[in-house]
Image: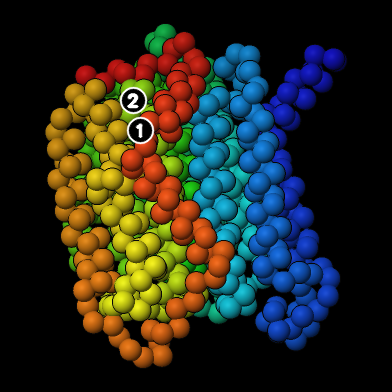
Amino acid sequence: MSLDFSRNVHFVWALLPEIVLCAWGIGVLLAGVSGRRDPRRAGGEGAVEALPSDDLGWLTLVGIAVAALANGWLHGVTEIGASSMIAVDGFRLFANWIFLLAAAFGVVMSFTYVWRQRLQAGEFYALILFATAGMMFMAGARDLIVVFLGLEVMSISVYALTAFNRRDRRSAEAGLKYFLLGAFSTGFFLYGLALTYGATGSTNVTAIALAVENGAATPGLLVAGVALLAVGFAFKVSAVPFHMWTPDVYEGAPTPVTAFMSVAVKAAAFVAFFRVFLVAFGGAYASWYPLMWWLAAVTMVVANLVALAQTNVKRMLAYSSVAHAGYLLVALTAANEQATAGMLFYLLVYAVMNMGAFAVVLAVGRQAEDNLQLDDYAGLGNRHPLLGVFLTVFLLSLAGFPGTGGFMGKIFLLQGAAESGLWTLSVVLVLTTVVSYYYYLRLAWYTWMRDPILDDQHEGVFVPLSLRMALAMGVAVVLFLGIFPGGFMALARESAQGLAGVGTLLLGMAP
């Protein structure tokens, strides 16, 4: 009895950040629906809101900070064995920092947006916390069933956030599209999970790895299971041809949600993708290597070419997000420690630079869904120089310009690909990066070189102090990681070594 109690206690400690987020989310939700009546803020006669939306936002940030403290405490915990359902390793903890960073940035972005759009702040912020908890479950899962549970907690929360602005038909349409296609992809994932269980007799990542390595897995069922799981993950990371939902959902969702979703959902999916395929299916690398190679190549080429034709900035950034998924798939195809560390570093940089770009879009859109065309950015640098500088830095980093974190992220991905001899895929990555310079620099050109549009619609740019500080810190992080990447890359490399907690893990099997 005492042994079982001890195990339960250890399991609770392992899930401490997730428990904090879930409990805090319930508290924020209750604070948002109980208390005084305030029709001016809540959007109608008789509506109830206990705290102003800004107060609920700051309360949410406190919860994220407490979860961060819990995640930091787990760095001092030594895990015994590698067969538990929840991992307490550097790979999971590094990913958790990315999720928490994205959640905090998303909350800060949404302060004024939630107030101006008269959204229910308590529900909005609670869903962000629940989605972040689901991402953490995915990152730490050593069992396919736990991966699925985390995936559903995250997905359902994000579905609701996408359709959260009920006064906007585009938001409702985006939520419906995302829900229907997400349910479809979930079916693929579940079928893959079932076939993997049939092939190996387990859903535990460690047990699957042992079965595959020892030749005890049924080959036909295993290959089918791997393929279906790959489809499920490919949908979540927006890999071509499973990306068709991305531009419509990103365009229709509230901009703070789009920013959060483009970074955090993608990061969670990639972290789980790496753990499942490098650990569980490491021994079957030869079976899934060709699939990942073509997914990466096609995603990079198609996304960057289609992005060239976009005049809507949110849709352009949506296809940009798809292209970055292709870059990260190169790391998965390489399947070595350097590539895995490069993936973690790249996700960290991507979180800052992509959310920063969307934050500027939100400011130009006047805390609404306005001014989304390229022409709306004409002369932005002349009218609002600091905002123009912020946007330009984020665009240059997304493009991979030297001196930015995005450039170093691509360098580390290329090093991982070169280590595995993926020369053709490396060339594709470089060439598509060059292509991406056109649509990123086109937006920067509109910002600085076009004559400003002088009318009421384009003069109402409002950037709250909290968002200005977040943008300034984001630019500082992007530039710091571009000039001094060594410390964070060393931490990412150490975290990638934590993924190898199973003796049967076959990192570095690429030809």
Specify the quadrant of the image occupied by residue 11: top right
Answer whether labels 2 and 1 touch (C-beta < 8 Å): yes
> Camera-side residue: 41 or 169?
41
Specify the quadrant of the image occupied by residue 213: top left
Q: Residue tagged by mark 2? A: 338
> Camera-side residue: 52 or 392?
392
Identified at 63% across, 18% down, the residue is 78
Q: Inspect the image, locate mark 2, and give the three-letter code of the amino acid beneath it.
A: Gln
> Camera-side residue: 329 or 379?
379
Taking the image as shown, residue 83 lies to the left or right of residue 56, namely left
Residue furthest out toward the bottom: 455
Q: Secondary structure at mark 1?
A: helix
Q: Residue 473 placed where, x, y %?
A: 48, 53
Identified at 38% across, 41% down, the residue is 481
Q: Residue tagged by mark 1? A: 342
Q: Residue 350 placed where, x, y %?
A: 39, 47
Instruction: Name the image quarter holding the N terminus.
Output: top right
Instruction: Name the image quarter holding the C terminus.
Output: top left
Q: Inspect the image, locate mark 1, and give the three-letter code of the amino acid beneath it.
A: Gly
Q: Residue 146 placed where, x, y %?
A: 59, 34
